[in-house]
Image (cartoon, helix red, strand yellow):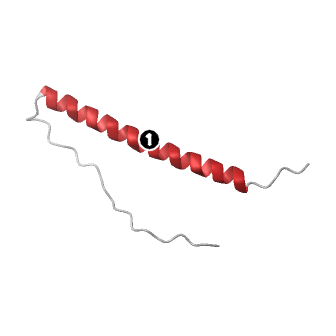
Amino acid sequence: MFEEEARPRPIQRFVPAPLQDWAETELRAYIADLQAEIARAEAAIAARSNQRATADAFFRPPPAG
C-alpha cells in the first residue's frame, strides 16, 4: 500500500475583529465576507464527503448473492 505523505497543516484559528469602531456598512461587508468564507468551507466539506462516499462505494465488497 502507498502511504500518504504527512503534510504539515497550518493551524489558523479565527480571530474576531474589533468591531466597536466600525460603521454599519463596514459591518455588513464583514458579515458578507464571513458568510462567503463559511460557504467555501462547507463546499470543501461536501467535496471531501463525496470523495469518501465514492471511495467507500468503489472498495465495498460486492453483496453476497
Figure check: 42 above or below 57:
above
Residue underneath mark 1: 42
Quarter of image, res 24: top left
Q: Callout 1, which amino acid?
A: Glu
Q: Is residue 64 left or right of residue 19?
A: right
Most extreme residue toward the left is 21
Q: Could you say whether the residue bearing mark 1 is in a helix, strand or loop?
A: helix
Most extreme residue toward the right is 65
Most extreme residue toward the top is 24
Residue situated in front as seen by the camera: 21 or 51: 51
Quarter of the picture containing the N terminus is bottom right
Quarter of image, res 17: top left
- Residue at 84%, 49% (x, y): give it: 63
Q: Position of residue 48 (x, y in %)?
A: 52, 49
- Residue at 44%, 41% (x, y): give it: 42
Figure check: 32 above or below 37:
above
Q: Residues within 10 Å of mark 1 (few under 14, many from 20)?
A: few
Q: Position of residue 51 (x, y in %)?
A: 58, 50
Q: Is residue 54 left or right of residue 65?
A: left
- Residue at 33%, 41% (x, y): give it: 37
Q: Position of residue 55 (x, y in %)?
A: 65, 53
- Residue at 45%, 46% (x, y): give it: 44
Q: How many marks?
A: 1
